[in-house]
Image (cartoon, rainbow, N blue to C red):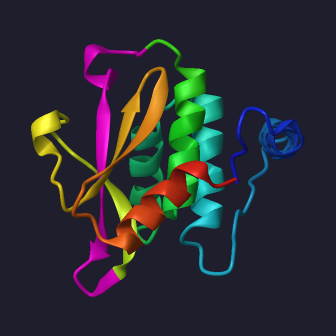
Amino acid sequence: MVARQSDRGRTSILYDVFDYFEDVREQGGKVFVHCCQGVSRSTSLVIAYLMWREGQSFDDAFQYVEAARGIADPNMGFACQLLQCQKRVYAFPLSPSSLLRMYRIAPHSPYDPLHLVPKMLNDPSPSAMDSRGAFIVHMPSAIYVWIGKNCEAIMERDARGSVLSD
């Protein structure tokens, strides 16, 4: 969805989509963005567009999209890529509270324990890290994956894969 900075080809496709959205918007039209279920791919594209067009943070854009489409749930790979995009756009944080964000890798819901997603911690600090878990640490200059020594293999795999995926 959102390409790494070094992947210019895919990035230009994303900007082609944004240009199309802008053209339609200037003509007073509307764009219907959809995918198979309207949960991950389409919502990730709309979040990326809001981040680009409105200068919104990932969290603000996600909350806006989720309010309009309650089942919005970008997969972990897309979410991490959007966080990386945010990191590049905001080389300097907008506020002191945006200096550090931490996400724990956790089940989306008790009903689907194998669907792991990043969940933002309200109090990002080293004391929040548990040796049984995997965490994504988002700083203005980098994104890190922290794997606890007692972390389950599936959680480690999903955390590493989400940050390294295209």
147 relative to 36, above or below: above
Q: Residue 120, how many percent across, how many down?
A: 28, 48
164 relative to 15, above or below: below
**Rendering quarter of residue 124:** top left
Residue 99 in magenta stretch: yes
Magenta-tinted stretch:
93-113
Q: Residue at x 16, y 35 (%)?
A: 126
Answer whether residue 139 is visible to the viewer in this image. yes
Q: Residue at x 54, y 59 (%)?
A: 161
**Rendering quarter of residue 97:** top left
Q: Residue 16, how many percent across, how many down?
A: 88, 42
150 left or right of 53 in image? left
89 relative to 3, above or below: above
Q: Which image quarter is the N terminus in?
A: bottom right
150 relative to 137, above or below: below
Answer whether residue 123 is visible to the viewer in this image. no
Q: In the depicted view, which residue is nearer to us: 123 or 40?
A: 123
Number of on-image labels: 0
Q: In the depicted view, which residue is nearer to us: 163 or 64?
A: 163
Residue 2 in magenta stretch: no
- Farthest front residue in view: 149
- Farthest left residue in view: 127
Q: Residue 47, how many percent across, how many down?
A: 56, 48
Q: Residue at x 29, y 40 (%)?
A: 102
Q: In the depicted view, which residue is nearer to us: 17 or 69?
A: 17
Q: Residue 37, how many percent across, how many down?
A: 60, 80
Q: Residue at x 46, y 65 (%)?
A: 158
124 left or right of 57 in image? left
Q: In the depicted view, which residue is nearer to us: 141 or 132?
A: 132
18 left or right of 127 in image? right
